[in-house]
Image (cartoon, helix red, strand yellow):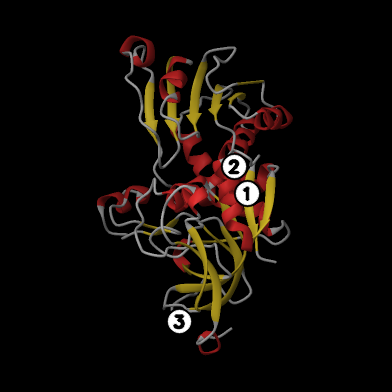
Amino acid sequence: MTAAESAGQRTTAWVVERPGPMCSSPLRRVQRMLEPPGPRELLIEVGACGVCRTDLHLAEGDLPPHRPACTPGHEIVGRVLSTGREVRDFSPGDRVGAAWLASTCGGCRYCRAGRENLCPNSRYTGWDVQGGYAGHTLVDAGYAYPLPEGPPDEDLAPLLCAGIIGYRALERAQLPPGGRLGIYGLGASGHLTAQLALARGATVHVLTRAASARRLALELGASSVGDAYDTPPEPLDSAILFAPVGDLVPVALAALDRGGTLAVAGIHLTDVPALDYRRHLFQERSLRSVTANTREDGLAYLAEVARHHPTVHVQRYPMNRADAALADLAADRVTGAAVLITQ
């Protein structure tokens, strides 16, 4: 499709009309004009879009909206329809993915140091720019990922945030070779990160409140499962908190062995209770946060996926039921990853 052909056409999209609990129906479907790509953009026909907890935080108001009537979704798989005049790396028909990081300034000290995830001028898909809960969307070509042919769209979509963020969280958790990893919360990110850690030779203990998630963890090869507030059967070298529950921070810290590290992977977390220094932090235990990801993280993770071929557990929803998918995520009715399908 050329820019001229796209002019005047419309696409259907979901927007966050008025943030609030899912029971208040914060999302609305709209028709909007299909914009041609800018000089460095790709116009993508969306095939699938993963449903991330960050989308839920945006819809319910935990994250303040950065633009009115924003379309959520940042785990986008689709086909290039047309490209801007300065794009050289992609062509119409290419299969591409778009993730959370939409753009950075490229010139600040963080970008220059390879830490673009900390860029003060960073922008995010489905928060600052329109996301993938739509038939079509625009993506900066410099932040798009080439995707392989073969796997279905719905199996690739969760890799683009749940997988990438899990990869960065595992790096931040400083898991030693053959180490003992605790995963708190086994949603989309957790079940992919568990498989990555297992492929690297780790022992994995999963602590999560949903019985279905505990069953999935055992199927994936976890050495033990328990409730989120349980104590794992052995001290942990590293832990990752995926559940957005601040009460679990001291629980996970207390489960660490000496010198262990807890990485908190969410963009939103409820308040963390007071910590007891000797119980939670003494003996050089560390508490670290995870902020977005770099494009290098994305490329490195997709390379590991190509080697280890994780199993992606997907609950499929048609695109016209995005509100139902988010409601199910809010109510813990999703095991693995929820994905919206357009076809």
The three-letter amino acid code for the residue at tag 1 is Ala
Of marks 1 and 2, which one's residue comes earlier in the chain? 2
Q: Is residue 56 above or below residue 199?
A: below
Pinpoint residue 156: horizontal percent, then vertical percent.
64, 54
Of marks 2 and 3, which one's residue comes earlier in the chain? 3
Asked if the residue at tag 3 contacts the one at tag 2, i.e. Cβ–Cβ closer than 8 Å, the answer is no
Of marks 1 and 3, which one's residue comes earlier in the chain? 3
Asked if the residue at tag 2 contacts the one at tag 1, i.e. Cβ–Cβ closer than 8 Å, the answer is yes
Near-viewer residue (327 or 250): 327
Q: What number of labels is visible?
A: 3
Disc sitting over residue 85 in the figure: 3
Q: Residue at x 47, y 56 (%)?
A: 26
Q: Residue at x 37, y 26 (%)?
A: 287
Pinpoint residue 2: horizontal percent, then vertical percent.
55, 86
The three-letter amino acid code for the residue at tag 3 is Arg
The residue that mark 2 highlights is 188
Q: Is residue 73 above or below residue 232?
A: below
The residue that mark 1 highlights is 338
CA distance separating discs 1 and 3: 35 Å
Q: Nearer the viewer, mark 2 or mark 3?
A: 2
CA neighbours of label 3 inside 10 A, class few (<14), some (14 to 19), many (20+)? few
Q: Quadrant of residue 40?
A: bottom left
